[in-house]
Structures are given as C-alpha cells and as structure tokens.
Image (cartoon, rainbow, N blue to C red):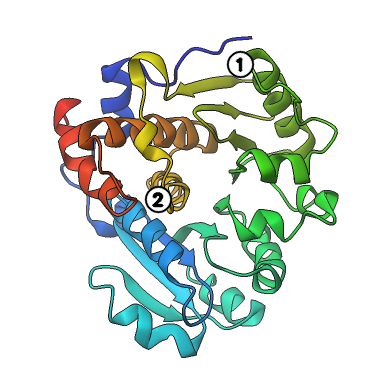
Amino acid sequence: MSTDPPCPDPALLRDRLAKRPDGFKYSHGHALILSGGPGQGGAARLAARGALRIGAGLVTLGCPLPALAENAARLDTVMLRPIHDAAALARVLEDARYNALCLGPGMGFARARELVPVALASGRGVVVDADALSAYAPDPPALFALCTPRTVLTPHGGEFARLFPDLSPRLPDAPAKAEAARRAARRAGAVVLYKGAETVIAAPDGRIALSDARGARAAPWLATAGSGDVLAGFIAGLLARGLPAMEAAETAAFLHVECARSFGPGLIAEDLPEALPAVFRDLGL
C-alpha cells in the first residue's frame, strides 16, 4: 500500500493546475457552495473563497432567502443564489454549467439531510463536509447508499468515528489510519479524506495518498477555526475544474498545507486562499 505524499512532483502539479490559455470562465467550471441560514454563512463563505482562488471559473453560494443580504454584504466575486429547499436545488441543477458542489459548512443538520440526496443524485462532483457528514451519524449507510465515485467525504477524527465506528483506529498511527481510510472509502463507494496532521486520502479502488503536515512539512497553524472549510472549498474548486475526485482531494490537501507553510505563524482561515497565488508561483504556474 503506497502512502507517499501526494503530488510531490511539481510537473504533475503544474499539469493538474495549469489553465488553458484559450479558456474562459465556464471552461474552468462553476462550483456551487451551499450554506445555512442567517448567521451561519461564514464557513460556506470560506469554502467559496477557497474554490474561487484555486481556479474555479465561477463560484455561487446558495443560501435561504433570509440569508442573502448578509452574504451579499460579505461577497463580491462570489455570486449568490436563493436555494431554500430540495426542490429549489433541483431546479438550479437543471443548469449543467454547475458541475461541482460543496455541502456541509455551516449548513445545519436538517438542511443537510434535505439537500445532500439531491446533490449526490445529480452525478456531479460533490464534497460532503462538516454538518453534511454529522447529519448522517445516526444512519451512515443512508449516506453511503447515495455516494458515487465523484463524491469526496472529508471527516476529521470525530466525524470519522461517527460514520465508521468499527473502523476508527484507537491508536491512529499512519498505518492504522491509512488502512481505516482505505476500508472506509470502499464501504462508502467514495473518496475519503481523513483529516488531521497526517491526512489520508483513499479511493474506493484502494489507492491511498498521504499529506503529512508534520516534520519537514509541519504546519501547526492549520489548527484554526475554518481551516477545514477552506479545504472543502479547494476540493470543490478542483472538481469544478474537471479533476477526478481522488486527484482533486489529494491536490487540495497538498496545497492546503503549502498555503499554511507559505503564510506561517499567525495564520487564520481567511489567509489560506490568499496564500495560493504565492504557492502557485513557487510551483511555476
């Protein structure tokens, strides 16, 4: 089982991340980030900013109508769309230009249980994070039955234990965590990004990648509120750009750490998307 750090080769990264010189915004994808109600939009705004910075051609934040004014006051380049319920989401997804979604950050459990089935049934690349994971803790098989190979689940240790209680390692060293993630991905039929200082990314076909934020790549500043929301947005943005789920997840995890290392001490989640341009320049993009 390979647990090499994902994307150590700059040439591979450049191939995944370079934009076509003849492209336009829709050719680089349109990510839809779904948010919660008033006062619950901060996490989704972080994800939206991450998706935009990582190169999605367009990003829209979908929220209930009462939250539109709040989000409009905080967003400029990210567009807004009122999406109140499952029927509204289904209507929005009739537009095929929305090709990737992110659900969970600040969404609330009830809203997540209503919207996740519509999102996963759409056949798009979908990131299921935060509240959208915890909403299924009482019945994980209900979530797994909806997943596709284009789904990325992004649990931290607590969420992993709730979704995969029999797989959660008691002593999560690298081999145990890698094996748990591999078995979880196979069970869910989705890519699983098992977060932590040593993040493991596993695909249903058995592929494993490791993004280690310790040792030479130590980035302790990532232990800050909202960091995971930005990571979810990075993944959604790369899905919108057309990367397969495994490649989107492992590339996002690598860049997430590189952004933290580039910025350094004092990092807060809002800084992560803003560090991407310098990371991209260092990669030769």
Q: Residue at x 43, y 53 (%)?
A: 226
Give the quadrant of the N terminus. Answer: top right
Q: Residue at x 62, y 43 (%)?
A: 155
Q: Residue furthest front?
A: 266
Give the quadrant of the C terminus. Answer: top left
Q: Residue 13 falls in which quadrant of the image?
A: top left
Q: In the drawing, does residue 165 fall left or right of residue 89?
A: right
Q: Residues within 10 Å of mark 1 (few under 14, many from 20)?
A: some
Q: Which residue is identified by label 2?
A: 230
Question: How far across and how far down the image is residue 82, in percent?
Answer: 47, 83
Label 2 secondary element? helix
Identify the disc placed on residue 174. 1
Circle 1: residue type:
Ala
Judging depth in this view, the residue of 261 and 79 nearest the camera is 261
Identify the disc placed on residue 14. none
**Relative to 76, is 212 above or below?**
above
**Relative to 15, is 69 above or below?**
below
Q: Residues within 10 Å of mark 2 (few under 14, many from 20)?
A: many
Circle 2: residue type:
Val
Q: Residue at x 41, y 37 (%)?
A: 252
Kindly tell me whether residue 66 is visible in this rendering. yes
Question: How far across and how far down the image is residue 152, in percent?
Answer: 59, 43
Question: How far across and how far down the image is residue 60, in percent?
Answer: 38, 69
